[in-house]
Amino acid sequence: MVWLTPWFMLQSVSSPVSMVLHVTDHLTTVMSIQPGGVLLRVGGIVLTLRFAASAVTEVFAVLSALFYVSIIPVILWALRRADVR
């Protein structure tokens, strides 16, 4: 269960804050990132099932955390570009 904690924490931070992408009209940006996240996680699970099936949960948690770590800079970029007054 310890492996899941970073993923849960990063998801808890990035999911509500990702509303910034909607408000700043950057939905196409985040929608272009989502397929990469799916490929990262599904590809990781498939490879793990093939080579180390007992580590599927850990690999999924780590890859999900990496995905959310990659989303946070995109959110910050969109926020910096926003013309908020």
Image (cartoon, rainbow, N blue to C red):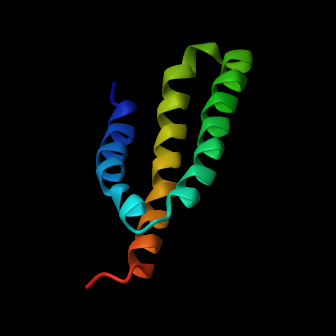
Residue drawn 32% across and 36% down? 5
Residue drawn 56% across and 21% down? 56
Position of residue 63 relative to residue 57, above or below, is below
Q: Residue furthest left?
A: 85
Indicate the quadrant containing the C terminus: top left, top right, bottom left or bottom right.
bottom left
Coordinates of residue 46 in the picture (x, y in percent): 70, 22
Coordinates of residue 40 in the picture (x, y in percent): 64, 39
Lateral position of residue 66 relative to residue 85, left or right: right
Coordinates of residue 34 in the picture (x, y in percent): 58, 45
Q: Quadrant of residue 79?
A: bottom left
Say how many tags the image has: 0
Residue situated in front as seen by the camera: 23 or 3: 23
Indicate the quadrant containing the N terminus: top left, top right, bottom left or bottom right.
top left
Coordinates of residue 25 in the picture (x, y in percent): 46, 65
Position of residue 67 relative to residue 55, above or below, is below
Residue drawn 33% across and 38% down? 8
Residue drawn 40% across and 78% down? 82
Residue situated in front as seen by the camera: 21 or 36: 21
